[in-house]
Amino acid sequence: MAMIKEILALKKERQATILAHNYQIPEVQDVADLVGDSLELSRAAARLDSDIIVFCGVDFMAETAAILSPQKKVILPVSGAWCPMAHMITPEELHDLKSFHPEAAVVCYVNSTAEIKAESDVCCTSANGVQVVNSLSEKEVIFVPDRNLASYVARHTDKKIIPWDGYCYVHNNFTVEEVRAARAEHPNAEVLVHPECPPQVIDQADFVYSTAGMGRHARASAAKEFIIGTEVGMIYRLEKDNPEKEFYPLSKDAICHNMKKTDLAKVLRALQTLEPQVAVPEEIAARARTAIERMLAVKI
Ligand code: 13P
Ligand code: SF4
C-alpha cells in the first residue's frame, strides 16, 4: 500500500521512531518499530537514540515519553486521543487526599496527567504496581487514579492502600457473567484479564497481567486457547505472535475509542508536519520525571 511505503520512507529519512501501544489498530501496529505495554514503551522512550518519536497511543503515554526525553520531539498523531481515567483526579483533589494522609507515600498509575505525576512520589504501570508499592518504606500508600488496580495491588501487599475512585470504562465494564459465558463456550481456554478489571472479574480469571504480560504468558503456556479480558486491539497482537493458538475477546465491545483514533493517514501527517508535538512545562516535567525514573529503577 502506497501510504505504508510513504510512512516507512519518511520515518527513515527523518530517523524517527514509531512507538505503538498494544491497543492500536493493526495497520498502525504494523508500521511501528516497537509495539508494547506502557512499561515497555516508557523504557523505550528513555533509551531511544532517535530525536523524533511518533507515539501512537493516548496522551499520558506521549507525555511520559516527553518527560523522559525533553530534548526529543514527541508527536502524538491525534491531539484529542486521551485516556479518560487519567483525567479522573485533579491536582487539587490529590492535595486534599495528601493532607488527610500526611504519612502516606503517593503512587500514581502511569495513566495520569503530568501534573499528578509531579505531585506523586513514584509512578507505576499495570506491569509493576505490586513491586513498586512493595519497594516503598511507608506503611500507607495513596494510590491514584484507578480503584481496580489499587484493589489488585492491595491484595498483594501488607501496606494500607488508600485508593482514588477512578476507573477505566473499557475494563470496568467486564462482568462475571461474561467470564462464565466465555468459559462455557471455550472450556479449554485459559482466562487472562487486565488488573484494571473489577475485583469480582479478577476472581474469576486464571491469570492477571498487563498487556505485555499477556503476550509473554500466551507464548509460554501449553494451552492452545485463551479468553482475553482487555481491550480488543490486543487480540491482533496475540494472533500475530501465536498463529497456532486461538484468542477470544472476553467482550467484543471492549473498545477504547481514543486508542482507535490513530490511523495510517494521521501517522503519515505526523511524520510530514512533526505536529502535534507534546511538551510538558519543565517545572512540572522535572518533578514528574523523578516519579517516573524512580519507577524505572524498581526491578521486576
Ligand atoms: P498496559 O500497560 O497493560 O498495556 O495498559 C495500558 C492501558 O491503558 C490499559 O488500559
Ligand atoms: Fe485509558 Fe482504558 Fe483506554 Fe487504557 S483502555 S487508555 S485505561 S480508557
Image (cartoon, grey):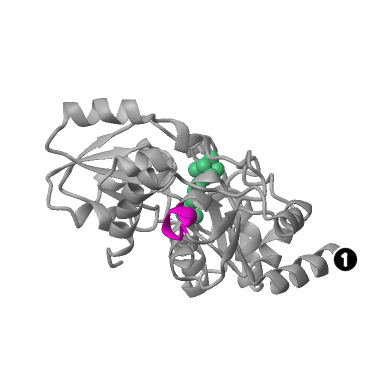
Measuring 46% from the left and 57% from the top, which residue is drawn there?
70
Q: Is mark 1 within 8 Å of ligand 2?
A: no
Task: Based on the picture, tell me whether residue 239 belongs to the magenta stretch.
Answer: no
Residue sitting nearer the eye, 55 or 23 = 55
Q: In the rendering, at what x and y percent does residue 160 appear?
A: 17, 40
The N terminus sits in image quarter: bottom right
Mark 1 residue crowding within 10 angstroms, few (<14) / some (14–19) / many (20+): few
Q: Is residue 98 left or right of residue 111?
A: left
How many discs appear?
1
Q: Is residue 147 left or right of residue 158?
A: right
Q: Is residue 279 visible in this depiction of the protein?
A: yes
Considering every residue shown, the one lying at the far right of the view is 2
- The magenta-colored residue range is 64-70
Residue 209 drawn above or below residue 138: below
Provide the major secondary structure of the magenta segment.
helix
Residue 170 drawn above or below residue 287: above
Measuring 70% from the left and 66% from the top, which residue is drawn there?
30
Q: Secondary structure at mark 1?
A: helix
Task: Based on the picture, tell me whether residue 67 belongs to the magenta stretch.
Answer: yes
Residue sitting nearer the eye, 182 or 281 = 281
Q: In the rendering, at what x and y percent does residue 82 appear?
A: 57, 40
Residue 19 drawn above or below residue 184: below
